[in-house]
Amino acid sequence: MQQHSDTETNNNEWVTTRVAATSLGVKPQQVRNYIANGELEAVTEGEGAKRRYLVSVSSLENLRAEQHSGGELPGQDHASSTESSATPKQEDASMPVRELAAELGEACYQLGRAEARLELTIEAKSSLREQLHRERERADRLEAEWERLVPNVLAEKDRANAERERAEQFETQLREALEGRRGWFRRFFGF
């Protein structure tokens, strides 16, 4: 038996002892016996109480082929194997393990995609919240600056209007003064 890493499990096709037992039509303990006898290839996963066996799909299919060609599984007597092969449970459990592994792989793939989409959605939502917060702060700063500058702008406008009025008054006074300095001849003839 071998120890393995998680990536090794994902790259090869492995199933649990329960799935292997269902495929063979036996109990999980019988699958562990096959593993102990070397009739099935398996690796261990986890340690201590969480330790479990993962059975190689190819060795499981080889054992199933032996079962079908010899008419019985190793470790069983002929009478019990013929009785169990006639049951509907045996026929239901004979679904090819590769199909189950492929379905499981597809389900894991879809789950991974869904998790990735969820993570991207959460990240986008967080980014949008941060951006909204920054824009609200910017709007508050601009509004405060507007309120601070509006009185200054209005005061400058009032000063500019007062200056214009003074300039117009000064212009009128200058015209009158110039008018008074012109001689009678120029005033009379208009040049």
Image: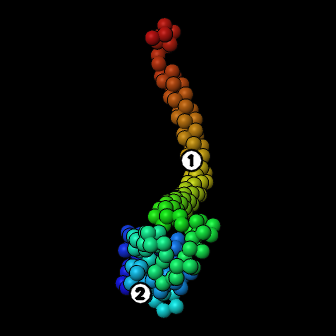
**Residue 58: percent from left, percent from top:** 39, 70
Residue located farthest toward the bottom when viewing the structure as drawn? 48
- Taking the spot 37% from the left edge, 74% from the top edge, the residue there is 8
Answer whether residue 61 is visible to the viewer in this image: no
**Residue 139: percent from left, percent from top:** 57, 54
If the image is split into quadrants, where does the N terminus sit?
A: bottom left
Residue 141 occupies quadrant: bottom right
If the image is split into quadrants, where does the C terminus sit?
A: top left
Q: Secondary structure at mark 1?
A: helix
Q: Please state which of residues 40 and 130 is positioned toward the viewer in this rendering.
A: 40
**Tag 1–tag 2 contact (CB < 8 Å):** no
Horizontal relation, residue 30 to residue 151: left or right: left
Q: Secondary structure at mark 2?
A: helix
Residue 130 occupies quadrant: bottom right
In three-dimensional space, the C-alpha distance between marks 1 and 2, rounded to whole angstroms, equals: 95 Å
The amino acid type found where label 1 is placed reads Val
Q: Which residue is mark 1?
A: 153
The amino acid type found where label 2 is placed reads Asn
Badge nearest the viewer, 1 or 2: 2
- Name above or below for residue 177 compared with residue 79: above
- Taking the spot 40% from the left edge, 81% from the top edge, the residue there is 39
- Name above or below for residue 111 compared with residue 22: above
Residue located farthest toward the front when viewing the structure as drawn? 79
Q: Which residue is mark 2?
A: 37
